[in-house]
Image: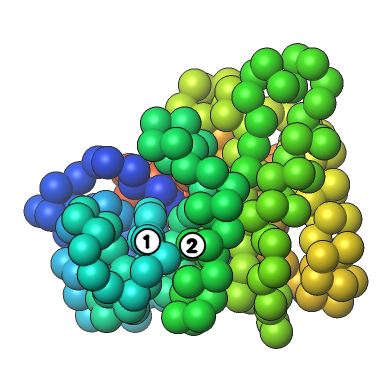
């Protein structure tokens, strides 16, 4: 039995005051509880501490995630953030491998794998993103492309519990474009991801790992995705920037 997860990726939006306001709004919207839905918000790094303080003071069960991490413990890595620094502000999740980081910052599957190793060593759950470009999809190679990403990103990872790892399938052509994949498109790839995870981690662990869909997910379409057997939630960009729309997705998932 996998609990649904709704995770918000705020990307490079919200200064510290705006982030605090958004987190407070969300806490108000979700004051009646989130039921069995696991809710995560991933603000920019500079906002993590303030958002953590808002979440800590509330009874709403909302977890904190970061959007990026570096794999070294400390040292001369200007601009980077170590896993232990994320732990120190209360982050328990971290997005890795987002297509914007792969595309704009040249991150490779090898980098993503090192980040996952480092996060697991610090008991932070990676939300590891994968997904194909429009070109790959139009060539009909999306399933094999994503399967290869999963194999590379998980190389050598050791899990003892399925809650330690989350996958987010985010077709690049659907991110921030308003163009969503259909629920059937999402299921096709998520089911292939699940089969690959079974080969890597074994049946039992793989059956408990959450696989999220991401790409223009919003209150109006979330239920359709969640009806698919291998889609266990959503990684939400644009619709996570307003407390009411993000909360509406959580409520729809309940
Ligand atoms: C994302 O970038 O993770 C994302 C899914 O964005 P959006 O919901 O805006 O498409």
Compared across the picture, whether 168 is left or right of 14 comes to right
The residue positioned 57% from the left and 52% from the top of the image is 110
Q: Position of residue 52 (x, y in %)?
A: 25, 72
Q: Quadrant of residue 91?
A: bottom left
Q: Nearer the viewer, residue 75 or 250?
A: 75
Compared across the picture, whether 214 is left or right of 46 comes to right
Query: Gap in Å between the C-alphas at discs 2 and 1?
Result: 6 Å
Q: 10 Å neighbourhood of mark 1: few (<14), some, or many (≥20)?
A: many
Disc marking residue 219: none
Q: Nearer the viewer, residue 198 or 231?
A: 198
In the rendered image of this protein, does residue 135 appear above or below residue 162?
above
> Which quadrant of the figure contains the N terminus?
bottom right
Residue under circle 2? 115
Residue under circle 1? 70
In the rendered image of this protein, does residue 240 appear above or below residue 69?
above
Circles 2 and 1: CB atoms closer than 8 Å: yes
Q: Is mark 1 within 8 Å of ligand 1?
A: no
Q: Quadrant of residue 182?
A: top right
Q: Position of residue 250 (x, y in %)?
A: 51, 56
The residue positioned 68% from the left and 61% from the top of the image is 154
The residue positioned 64% from the left and 37% from the top of the image is 131
Q: Position of residue 146 (x, y in %)?
A: 73, 40
- For the question of whether residue 142 can be seen, the reply is yes
Q: Nearer the viewer, residue 119 or 181?
A: 119
Q: Quadrant of residue 32?
A: bottom left
In the rendered image of this protein, does residue 20 appear above or below residue 234?
below
Q: Secondary structure at mark 2?
A: helix
Compared across the picture, whether 139 is left or right of 115 comes to right
Q: Position of residue 16 (x, y in %)?
A: 13, 54
């Amino acid at each position: 039995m996998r609990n649904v997860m709704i995770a918000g990726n705020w990307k490079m939006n919200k200064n510290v005051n705006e982030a605090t306001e958004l987190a407070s709004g969300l806490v108000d919207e979700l004051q009646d509880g989130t039921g069995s839905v696991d809710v995560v918000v991933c603000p920019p790094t500079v906002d993590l501490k303030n958002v953590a303080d808002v979440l800590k003071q509330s009874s709403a069960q909302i977890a904190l995630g970061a959007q990026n991490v570096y794999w070294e413990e400390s040292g001369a890595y200007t601009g980077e953030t170590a896993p232990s620094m994320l732990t120190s502000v209360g982050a328990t999740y971290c997005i890795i491998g987002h297509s914007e980081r792969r595309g704009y910052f040249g991150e490779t599957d090898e980098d993503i794998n090192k980040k996952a190793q480092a996060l697991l060593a610090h008991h932070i759950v990676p939300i590891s993103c994968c997904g194909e470009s429009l070109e790959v999809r139009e060539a009909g190679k999306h399933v094999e492309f994503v399967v290869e990403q999963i194999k590379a990103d998980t190389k050598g990872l050791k899990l003892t519990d399925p809650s330690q790892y989350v996958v987010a399938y985010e077709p690049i052509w659907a991110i921030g474009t308003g163009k969503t994949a259909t629920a059937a498109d999402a299921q096709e790839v998520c089911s292939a991801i699940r089969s690959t995870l079974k080969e890597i981690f074994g049946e039992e662990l793989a059956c408990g790992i959450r696989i999220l869909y991401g790409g223009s997910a919003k209150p109006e379409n979330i239920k359709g995705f969640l009806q698919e057997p291998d889609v266990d939630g959503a990684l939400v960009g644009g619709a996570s920037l307003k407390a009411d729309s993000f909360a509406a997705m959580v409520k729809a998932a309940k």
